[in-house]
Amino acid sequence: MSSTTQGARARARLEVTAAIKDEARRQLAAEGAAKLSLRAVARELGMVSSALYRYFPSRDDLLTALIIDAYDSLGECAERAHGKAADAGPVGRWTAVAEAVRDWALRHPHEYALIYGSPVPGYTAPDTTVPPASRVGLLFIGILRDAHQDSGLTEPPRPPSCAPRPSAWPPTWPLISPGDGRGPDRRLGPAVRARRVRAVRAVPPGRGGPRDVLPARGGPARPGRRPGVSRRGRRGGRTSRGVSVITTPG
């Protein structure tokens, strides 16, 4: 077989593959990825389904090809914008890439939904999708790395309403705290919470344990407790709702 014949067959295969992908993208826009069907694609192209299976053995193979194409198209768009803003600072490059990603998503909403939307039922993306999916993320990581090395990245001033509040809980408290400085996370199960509390209490003094912050027994009230109120009703009377009430001299 001559090289000319082989080249013609290769070109024909590329053309048929491109036509299959274009029809599949039209189905994505009309029906969604979950309803993508090889038989429907073959019917619209005037092909028998057995002929289409020679190009894509299964629906998942066709989905994988569409996903890789979408990631590559988005990556090329982002990289092109990054190259045009190469002389700008980190903020300028970051903005250029972000705007390019947004513009691509607006031009290709169905492909953007395919790669960043809800997972397709019954489909598991293979490892071949990882390199093209990493292109945009690697651009952003590179911008952050350059900004850190050049000291060009600074934290903007925070408004007073967003200033962090100091917490009286020890640094080890996040092991059992939801992060708001109010004590143990009540969403944890009792057994898990008890194990974590024991672990926090076992931290030696001077290493951020509760002994470094919380007062000993008989000292001031712990954070989150109001003076004069007993949670377990050890002092004072108990109301009908189980709340301990303490009366003090007027």
Image: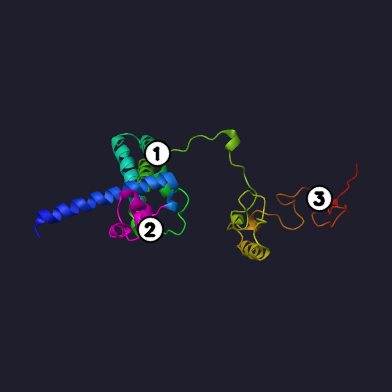
The residue depicted at 18 percent of the width and 54 percent of the height is 10
Of labels 2 and 3, earlier in sequence is 2
Q: Nearer the viewer, mark 2 or mark 1?
A: 2
Return the residue nearer the eye: 239 or 152: 239
Find numbered disc 3 in the image and state the secondary structure of the residue it sits on.
Answer: loop
Quarter assignment of residue 204: bottom right
Q: Amino acid at mark 1?
A: Ala
Return the residue nearer the eye: 161 or 123: 123
Residue contact between numbered discs 1 and 3, judged by CB atoms under 8 Å: no
The residue depicted at 41 percent of the width and 52 percent of the height is 36
| Residue at numbered disc 3 | 229
| Residue at numbered disc 2 | 60
Q: Which mark is residue 98?
A: 1
Residue contact between numbered discs 2 and 1, judged by CB atoms under 8 Å: no
Q: Is residue 154 magenta?
A: no
Of labels 1 and 3, earlier in sequence is 1
Q: Residues within 10 Å of mark 1 (few under 14, many from 20)?
A: some
Magenta residues?
36-65
